C-alpha cells in the first residue's frame, strides 16, 4: 500500500511550502536506491512540493532501469544523466536542473527520518542561513560497520563539530545538507576539479561570502558507514588527499584540528629513523603509549554510548585507520603538489 494513501488533510500542500529538490547522485546502487526513494515517499512534507532528482553516473547494475520505471509512473521522481560522473558535477546538476527553491544533497545510501525535509525547511526559514544540516545517525548493517560508525561519531575519531553537537549552532560544514538553490548558483556552484571534498569547499566559499551554515540536531538521517576497515582506509585516504587540495585553495580556512592527523602520520613515518637514537626511542615510546591510552579511553566511551552492540576490536582499530589514512593522504598530496604544482592527481 502506498504510504501516501492515508496522508491527513493537514499535509496537503500549502502555497507557503517551498518547492524542494532532493539531489541524489547514483552509480550502481541497486541495493540502496529503493530504500532511499521509499524514505522520501514517506516524508511528512507535501509530495507535490517535493521532487527527487536521481543523477545517474552511468549505472550498469539495473539501478537506472529501476529508477526509470518508477519515474515513468511517479511524478515526483526524475532521472538525469551525469556524464562527468563526479559528485561535484552531480551537485551542480541538482542546483541547475532542480525545480526546487531549496536543494538537498543526499546520498543514495542514506535514509532520512520522516520529518527530515520539513525540519530542514523549517530551520532554513527560521535561521536565515544559506544551508542547514543535522545529525548523521551512523547505523551499520553488521557489527563491523556499526563499530566503524561509532568511531566516526566519536570526537576522538572525527573532530568536526557537526558529527557530535547536541544543540543548534553555526558550523563550518554540514551533512546531508539543504541549501537555498539560488545561493548555490550565485556562489558559482561546486568545484568540479575536485574529485572529493567539493561540498566542504563550497561551504568555505559560502562562509567567506558572509553566509551562515547551521547545524540542528532535530534534523536526522541515517548514514551507512563503510563495511570494514579496508573500505574505511580507502575512504579516509581519498578524503585526506583532496582535503590537501582544498587547503591549498583556501589556506586561511585551515584549522589546528586539520593538522593533527598529518602530523601524527608524519611522526609514524619518521619513527624508524627516530628510534636509532636514545632520545628518539624515548619520544616514540612516549607518543605510542599516549596514543594507545587515548585510543583505549575513546573505544570504551564510544562502545558504552553507542545504542547497538559493536565489535570492540574493529572500533579500536578504526581510530588509527582513520587518523593514519587521512594524514597520509594529506601528506602525499602535499608532496605531489610541491613536485608538480600545476597538476592534480585524480585518484
Image (tube, helix red, strand yellow):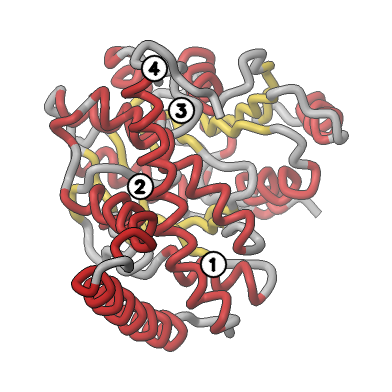
Q: Earlier in the sequence, mark 3 or mark 1?
A: 3
Q: Which residue is mark 4?
A: 340
Q: 268 or 236, which is in the foreground?
A: 268
Q: Secondary structure at mark 2?
A: strand
Report whether 208 appears left or right of 48.
left
Q: CA distance from mark 3 to mark 1?
A: 36 Å
Position of 81 with respect to 20 (left or right) is right
Judged by depth in the image, the label closer to the viewer, 4 or 3, is 4
Which residue is denoted by mark 2 in the rendering? 133
Name above or below for residue 8 compared with residue 99. Answer: below
- Foreground residue among 192 and 35: 192
User: Tag 4, which secondary structure?
Assistant: loop
Marks 4 and 3, the one that precedes in the sequence: 3
- Label 1 near label 3: C-beta < 8 Å? no
Q: Which mark is residue 19?
A: 3
- Residue 195 in the image: state x and y as whole percent: 50, 26
Question: Between 193 and 271, which is closer to the camera in this rendering?
Answer: 271
Amino acid at each position: 500500500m502506498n504510504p501516501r494513501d492515508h496522508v491527513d488533510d493537514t499535509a496537503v500542500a500549502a502555497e507557503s511550502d517551498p518547492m524542494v529538490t532532493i539531489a541524489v547522485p547514483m552509480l550502481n546502487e541497486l541495493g540502496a536506491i529503493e530504500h532511499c526513494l521509499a524514505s522520501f515517499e514517506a516524508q511528512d512534507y507535501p509530495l507535490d512540493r517535493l521532487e527527487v532528482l536521481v543523477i545517474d553516473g552511468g549505472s550498469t547494475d539495473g539501478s537506472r532501469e529501476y529508477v526509470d520505471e518508477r519515474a515513468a509512473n511517479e511524478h515526483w521522481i526524475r532521472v538525469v544523466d551525469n556524464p562527468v560522473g563526479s559528485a561535484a558535477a552531480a551537485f551542480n546538476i541538482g542546483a541547475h536542473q532542480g525545480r526546487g527553491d531549496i536543494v538537498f544533497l543526499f546520498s543514495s545510501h542514506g535514509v532520512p527520518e520522516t520529518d527530515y525535509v520539513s525540519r530542514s525547511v523549517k530551520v532554513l526559514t527560521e535561521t536565515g542561513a544559506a544551508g542547514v544540516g543535522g545529525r548523521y545517525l551512523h547505523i551499520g548493517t553488521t557489527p563491523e560497520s556499526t563499530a566503524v560508525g561509532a568511531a566516526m561519531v566519536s570526537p576522538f575519531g572525527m573532530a568536526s563539530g557537526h558529527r557530535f553537537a547536541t544543540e543548534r549552532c553555526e558550523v563550518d560544514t554540514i551533512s546531508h545538507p539543504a541549501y537555498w538553490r539560488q545561493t548555490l548558483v550565485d556562489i558559482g556552484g561546486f568545484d568540479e576539479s575536485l574529485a572529493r571534498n567539493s561540498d566542504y569547499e563550497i561551504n568555505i566559499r559560502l562562509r567567506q561570502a558572509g553566509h551562515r551554515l547551521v547545524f540542528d540536531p532535530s534534523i536526522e538521517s541515517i548514514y551507512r558507514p563503510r563495511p570494514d576497515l579496508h573500505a574505511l582506509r580507502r575512504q579516509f585516504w581519498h578524503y585526506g588527499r583532496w582535503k590537501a587540495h582544498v587547503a591549498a585553495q583556501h589556506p586561511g580556512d585551515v584549522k589546528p584540528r586539520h593538522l593533527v592527523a598529518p602530523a601524527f602520520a608524519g611522526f609514524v613515518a619518521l619513527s624508524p629513523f627516530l628510534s636509532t637514537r636514545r632520545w628518539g626511542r624515548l619520544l616514540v615510546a612516549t607518543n605510542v603509549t599516549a596514543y594507545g591510552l587515548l585510543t583505549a579511553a575513546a573505544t570504551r566511551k564510544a562502545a558504552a554510548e553507542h545504542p547497538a552492540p559493536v565489535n570492540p576490536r574493529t572500533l579500536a582499530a578504526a581510530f588509527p585507520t582513520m587518523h593514519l589514512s587521512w594524514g597520509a593522504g594529506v601528506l602525499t598530496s602535499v608532496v605531489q603538489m610541491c613536485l608538480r604544482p600545476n597538476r592534480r592527481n585524480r585518484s
